[in-house]
């Protein structure tokens, strides 16, 4: 089955610096790759996602890149702010059909600390 | 909209006890799922449902039962609690349509089994 590895497990950056979190997946049939942010005591919340027919997607300070050949995708946060401190999870879809983009395997998570 | 709601927020059980974790959503989402979150292991899928009357197993279904009698509700039952089931449980829901995969998570239930 699908396996998603996420690195690093913890990341500390200075406010204003960039942060990069990387994930690799094993199932070449995966076609949907979301990133979720979880703040303390809350449920995860989608921040950005990408589908397999797109190589890069950007939303303000957040961007995601996908390399299907190498089976890895990355989250890039620029100009980090203290409110970016949280746990970030990558995920990959299970199954072949697009409608099953709902079914996900998650990485283990990255604790991001932004120091001001 | 209340979104996805979960009750209780906290629960302590003794080994062997049973209980039901409640989950409800008011967004008319077809797809609902249960995850457990353990330190260093991310979120693991327990069971999911693609609509009323249809459920299926995820990665870690043993020890848990689900049913989906309505679109809104998706309870998770622990039949005989074990210490290995100590975890934080999240319910999530989403549309089941091509291109609408965002999952909305509830606030979680922290369960301790002693």
Image (spheres, coloured by chain):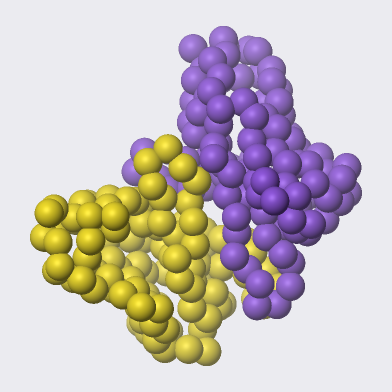
**Residue beneath the point at 56% across and 61% down:** A104
Q: Is residue B66 visible?
A: yes
Instruction: Please give left or right for residue B27 compared with residue B86 in the image.
Output: right
The image quadrant where one finds the N terminus of chain A is bottom right
Can you tell which chain is drawn purple?
B
- A18 lies left or right of B71: left
Total number of numbered labels?
A: 0
- Name the spot of residue B40 as percent of width and height, x first: 34, 43
Q: Which chain is yellow?
A: A
Q: Is residue A73 left or right of residue A81?
A: right
Q: Position of residue A71 (x, y in %)?
A: 40, 78
Q: Say which residue appears at 46% left-offset and 42% top-offset.
A: A42
Q: Is residue B90 above or below residue A67?
A: above
Residue drawn at point x = 37 percent, y = 41 percent: A40
- Counting from the top left corner in percent of width and height, residue A25 is at 42, 69
Q: In the rendered view, tell whether residue B75 sits above or below residue A24.
A: above
Choose between A20 and B86: the one closer to the eye: A20
Residue A60 location, quadrant: bottom left
Q: Of B15 and B94, which appears nearest the observer?
A: B94
Q: Quadrant of the C terminus of chain A?
A: bottom left
């Amino acid at each position: 089955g699908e396996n998603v590895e996420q690195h690093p497990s913890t990341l500390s950056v200075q406010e204003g610096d960039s942060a990069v979190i990387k994930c690799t997946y094993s199932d070449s049939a995966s076609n949907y790759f979301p990133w979720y942010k979880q703040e303390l005591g809350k449920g995860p919340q989608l921040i950005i996602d990408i589908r397999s027919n797109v190589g890069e997607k950007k939303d303000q300070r957040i961007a995601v890149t996908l390399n299907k050949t190498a089976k890895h995708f990355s989250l890039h946060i620029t100009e980090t702010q203290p409110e970016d401190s949280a746990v970030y999870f990558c995920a990959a879809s299970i199954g072949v059909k697009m409608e099953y983009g709902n079914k996900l395997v998650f990485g283990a998570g990255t604790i991001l600390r932004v120091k001001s | 909209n209340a979104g996805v709601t979960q009750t209780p927020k906290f629960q302590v059980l003794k080994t062997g006890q049973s209980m039901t974790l409640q989950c409800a959503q008011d967004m008319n989402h077809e797809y609902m799922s249960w995850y457990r979150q353990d330190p260093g292991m991310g979120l693991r899928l327990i069971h999911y449902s693609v609509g009323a009357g249809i459920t299926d197993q995820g990665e870690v279904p043993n020890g848990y039962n689900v049913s989906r009698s309505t679109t809104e509700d998706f309870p998770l039952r622990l039949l005989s609690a074990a210490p290995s089931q100590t975890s934080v449980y999240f319910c999530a829901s989403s549309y089941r349509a091509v291109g609408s995969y965002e999952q909305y998570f509830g606030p979680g239930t922290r369960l301790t089994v002693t």
